[in-house]
Amino acid sequence: MKKLIFQNNDAIPALGLGTWQAPRGEVGQAVREAIRCGYRHIDCAAIYGNEKEIGDALQAAFSAGEVRREELWITSKLWNTNHCKAEVRPALEKTLADLQLDYLDLYLIHWPVVLVEKPVLPHVPENFIPLDEVPISETWEGMEACLEAGLARHIGVSNFSIKKLKQLLETARHRPEMNQVEMHPLLAQNELAVFCGAEKMHLTAYTPLGRPASPDLPPNAPELLKDPTVMAIAAQRNCTPAQVLLAWAMERGTSPIPKSVTPKRIEENFAAQNVSLSTADMAALNGLDRHYRFVDGTFWTPPGGCYTLENLWDE
């Protein structure tokens, strides 16, 4: 099993099971199936609304002797309504209670966006608090306190640009060790990868398969699994297009977290670790980069709000 190594020699399995949009009533069984297949890395978040079911599945797997807690890497994320320093630990403790765990292996700030306590949906400008009122440095102090209390063994961020990482590094007592971002051949994030590598910061790749069959995508969204280059490499390597995309992510030294609740696909995705891509394959896949985001962040940018796509992504 491929792994990424942290500064203290802890190792995160490179391939994880994503649980975003994994429906309640199905996600627990998916976690059990993934553990049986050999997955040891499960990616969660409070906002996904399914951590209680995942916690039940984990406890069932422990009780059945399928895996021990120390063999698993469990990640979760702090939601946008809990960015004030005093709110961070209670939010993590709620996640730990739902997951029925004593600690997380990794806890991340989910977005560099701050929301009021109980925002009204759909989002309106009044839902948002500017970062100059609740800066990331304050949220990070809360994250550091959780690390020092042993509630999380590693801490990091998600959806952070190079600019925001640099700002955080100026004041952080404990450096962020992970940045979870959208990443796939259509959005290779090369500059970010170089920066994070230089700063000894790992990258988790969410949406590594391009969100196939997601109902909220525009009708003209590209279908990454049906891209001719991806399909041609899959045919040549006698594997699935999904396995090609996951192998590409792992070959770059990142950690992809594909979501599936289908046993066959869970098993197929796990087998991507056995797929070898040639230098020519990697070059062809790298050539697909067009900076296309399936998760473009527009849901944080209502007219008149304090967040824009420009100050969200700093591009």
Image (cartoon, grey):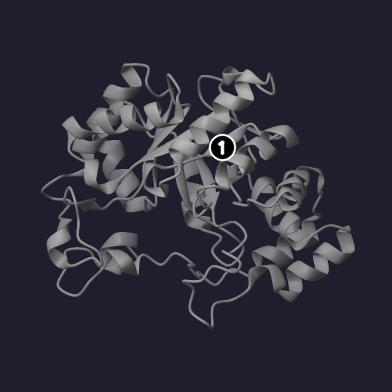
Q: Is residue 105 left or right of residue 84?
A: right
Residue 299 image-quadrant placement:
bottom left
Residue type highlighted by circle 1: Ile
Expressed as whole percent of the image width and height from the top left, the position of residue 298 reads: 33, 69
Residue visible at 50% across and 55% down in the picture: 21
Q: Is residue 246 left or right of residue 231?
A: left
Q: Secondary structure at mark 1?
A: strand
Q: Quadrant of the C terminus?
A: bottom left
The residue labelled by disc 1 is: 42
Residue visible at 84% across and 57% down in the picture: 239
One can see residue 199 in this view: no
One can see residue 15 in this view: yes
In the rendered view, would you say 44 is above or below 11? Answer: below
Q: Is residue 294 left or right of residue 93?
A: right
In the rendered view, would you say 233 is above or below 90? Answer: below
Residue visible at 54% across and 72% down in the picture: 290
Q: Nearer the viewer, residue 117 or 300?
A: 117
